[in-house]
Image: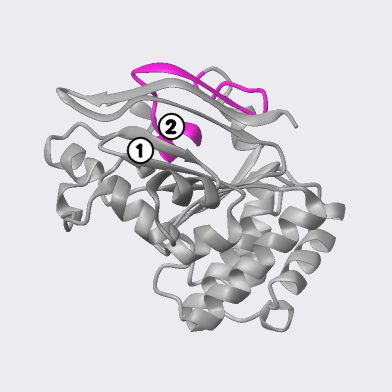
Amino acid sequence: MAAIIEVKNLTKKFGDFVAVKDVSFSVEEGGIFAFLGPNGAGKSTTIKMLTTLLRPTSGSMSINGHDPVIEPDLVRHSFGIVFQDPSLDEDLTALENLELHGALYGVPADILRKRIDELLALVELIDRRNDFVRDFSGGMKRRLEIARGLLHHPKILFLDEPTLGLDPQTRNHLWGYVQKLNNDEGVTVFFTTHYMEEADRVAKEIAIIDHGSIIAKGTSRALRSQTGTETLEDAFLRLTGSGIRDEASSSLDRMRVHGRYWSGGRR
């Protein structure tokens, strides 16, 4: 099957700091791809480049056949995204959040209402459509964000630690929705997580990044075989080390400290 995401020799520098270094990988259309790494490894910086929020220093990217640097609008219409941090308007209802997103993406009015109903039913929020998001639990907000990310029929869904802070039951339900979308609509899924059992259970292929470089790629079984370990978590620790990583030393925080982070790669 053809690759829907192609990354070749991708590098991002902020002054003297190299956040992503000569990264190359591909994701097959219809696949579920896990992008794993410790804090500050370069995951978020790579996702920001793929989703047009940062310009690379060098290298190339292709998202659904389009270049994020040259054709950002076409790329944005090719993907939906669930950010690590909440991004819903809590003063709007679930329905109003989806209607706003549909308007921003130019979804025709005659299609929008049907699509909203389909997605709210999928994530089991149809009965809460007129409730304010501020009254939703964390899991309900995550489910609504997934529905919002899929509203414009994207080919790719980016999920940046979508289950962070959720209880095990909600996490299992959320991945059930994602797998159903992948199976029924052929949506390609690109996700990050610190829960290794999620990647082990859901991902068809995995890439591990550390210190800005890809250090291993393959299926969970291949990575376990490569490292001589019994679990994906043990393989991950064997490859990246067992030392505690300081969240404050992440590449994004370093960029902010040095004043070198800006949306789109421009001051």
- Establish if 161 lies above or below 57: below
The residue at 30%/51% (across/down) is 238
The residue at 72%/54% (across/down) is 182
Local SS, label 2: helix
Q: Which residues are magenta?
A: 46-69
- Say which mark, if any, is on residue 176: none
Q: Nearer the viewer, residue 135 or 137?
A: 137
Q: Amino acid at mark 1?
A: Thr
| Residue 68 painted magenta | yes
Can you identify the residue that label 2 sits on?
Answer: 49
- Establish if 218 lies above or below 116: above
The answer to whether residue 136 is visible is no
Residue 166: horizontal and vertical position, in percent? 45, 76
Q: Residue placed farthest to the right in the image?
A: 110
The residue at 58%/53% (across/down) is 203
Can you identify the residue that label 1 sits on?
Answer: 45
Q: Amino acid at mark 2?
A: Met
Quadrant the C terminus occupies: top left
Residue 235: horizontal and vertical position, in percent? 38, 53
Distance CA(mark 2)–CA(mark 1): 6 Å
